[in-house]
Image (tube, helix red, strand yellow):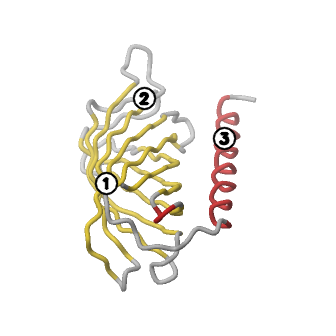
Amino acid sequence: MDNTSGRAHGMARGFQAVAVVLWGLACSGYARAAEPTGPSVYLEGGQTVQQGSDTRMVTIGLRLPVQRTFWDGRVTLAWDLYLSDWKADALPGVRSQFSQIGLVPMFRYRFDAGQSPWFVEGGVGVSYLDESYQTANKSFSTQWNFSDHLGVGRSFGVERRQELGLYVKHVSNAGLRRPNPGETFVLLRYAYAF
């Protein structure tokens, strides 16, 4: 099995594991409660999805909810402040590890008039890489970039203090400067609210 098909097989197994966990949570009988109002911390990890690119990301983040709801409580707003570590498939003699800091407003929609433990969310914010990102196949022209996030997940546990979700994160400068290949990651996130 070559490296590309091995990585694809590994990602498929990872998605299967996430599906099993989310299905198990969906079948559990946890009580419904309101959205947690305090801050939460999260950890997420994953890798790029483009063929020919092999960068892994690990993130620690802080979510600060805004005490405002929209659309009869179905939509909430929070700020995500995060620090990520990227490990890339760099060229020989070129830096392979990068740090990213970002700030993203996230809008979350809960099903069942805001009472469901299931949610989808998304947001577009800004991020900064400590050095220009270069790999064997890509080169960013800017250190400042936009950071687009889209996720689906489920809250569980006492007062919905825990969450598990699957996210797609795209980082690019939106064509403000060339080259702008962008990088897209698929990430698994675990969060805990205080």
Q: Nearer the viewer, residue 24 or 83?
A: 24
Residue extending farthest to the right is 1
What amino acid does circle 1 point to?
Asp
Residue receiving disc 3: 8
Residue 111 against residue 139 in the figure, above or below? below
Q: Disc 3 and disc 2: Cα gap in Å?
A: 20 Å
**Label 3 neighbour load within 10 Å: few <14, some 14-19, many 20+:** few
Q: Quadrant of the C terminus?
A: bottom left
- Mark sitting earlier along the chain (3/1): 3
Mark 2 or 1, nearer chain start: 1
User: Which residue is at a point 44% across and 44% down the rendered structure image?
Assistant: 43
Residue at 26 percent of width and 32 percent of height: 130
Q: Which residue is mark 2?
A: 135
Instruction: Check the image and report above or below for 87 versus 171.
Output: above
Please tell me how crowded label 2 is: few (under 14), some (14-19), or many (20+) other residues with Cα within 10 Å: some
Q: Quick one: 135 or 168, which is closer to the camera?
A: 168
Residue at x 28%, y 41% (from the top left corner): 101
Choose the circle earlier in sequence order: 3 or 2: 3
Q: x and y percent of residue 32 in the render?
A: 52, 74
Give the percent coordinates (x, y) of residue 105.
29, 61
Disc on res. 56: none
Q: Is disc 3 placed on a helix, strand or loop?
A: helix
Q: Quadrant of residue 98?
A: top left
Q: Secondary structure at mark 1?
A: strand
Residue 80 is labelled as: 1
In the image, what residue type sits under mark 3? Ala
In this rendering, position of residue 55 left or right of residue 23: left
